[in-house]
Image (spheres, rainbow, N blue to C red):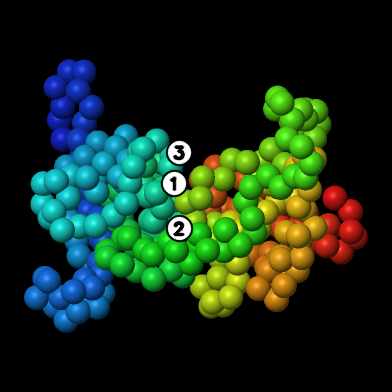
Amino acid sequence: MTATAEKPAEAGAIPSMTVTLKILRFDPDGLDGREAGTEYWEEFTVEAHATDRVLDALHKIKWEQDGSLAFRRSCAHGVCGSDAMRINARNRLACKTLLKDLNPAKPIMVEPIKGLPVEKDLIVDMEPFFASYREIMPFLMTTGTAPERERLQSPEDRARFDDTTKCILCAACTTSCPVFWTDGQYFGPQAIVGAHRFIFDSRDEGEWDRLEILNDKAGVWKCRTAFNCTEACPRGIEVTKAISEVKHALNTGEI
């Protein structure tokens, strides 16, 4: 069943509509009577408003129709990054994606993000993703005596890496990358973005350590400049540009 015409509404009320979500589910334990490890599509129909988000529709399904549906969410305001999933074949945050922007006259396809092991339904194992992030040492590295106050930095120096500070670790960029889908060693775009944030920070002294890590066969040279990562980023980070700047630093020895 697909979306129907909007129903007559009372004065001042927001019209509602019927929307279908087609969700790719995964049953790891066979609790639904299926063989353990079964992957299958299931459709749900909900009443919603055009201005509702995909997350709102998922909540209605879980709270009113099937409490076994599993997905991650936390802040619901596009800050925590926990509800990244594939919606109509694109990586998005469910809390930032409005139903009206998805052509709700057709079933809305919802799947887990690709390239990471699925644990249940829309929940994936994020450990491989965070392992790559930890490997690039995502923290300020300095030597000498710590200052009594904050380490000052000019607006120009801050602007050098401002874009990559916006990352919320949602994994939307990394799991949109076709190289990441097929290469189990590649760090992925987010790890490079995380490294960029410190490599170009004038207060940091570990830039060459990080560049050496990214110069590895699993590092920055795996990127094929598909721009999927930039398109997928819910924070608007120019991911491909950041990767290019890291490559340039390795090629020229200049930061």
> Would residue 81 appear left or right of 58 to someone viewing this image?
right
Residue 98 appears in the rendering: no
Mark closer to the chain start, 2 or 3 = 3
Q: Which mark is residue 90?
A: 2
Please tell me whether mark 2 sits on a helix, a strand or a loop.
strand
Q: Quadrant of residue 178?
A: bottom right
Report the Cα–Cα distance between label 3 and label 1. Answer: 6 Å
Q: Is residue 129 depicted above or below 205 in this figure?
A: below
Q: Quadrant of residue 237?
A: top right
Residue at (83%, 62%) from the top-left corner?
A: 250
Mark 1 or 2: the one toward you:
1
Q: Which residue is mark 1?
A: 81
Please tell me whether mark 3 sits on a helix, a strand or a loop.
loop
Q: Amino acid at mark 2?
A: Arg
Residue at (89%, 59%) from the top-left corner?
A: 253
List the single residue furthest toward the bottom.
35
List the single residue furthest toward the top.
11
Residue 25 appears in the rendering: yes
> Would residue 72 appear left or right of 139 to someone viewing this image?
left
Mark 2 or 3: the one toward you:
3
Residue at (46%, 70%) from the top-left corner?
A: 115
Callout count:
3
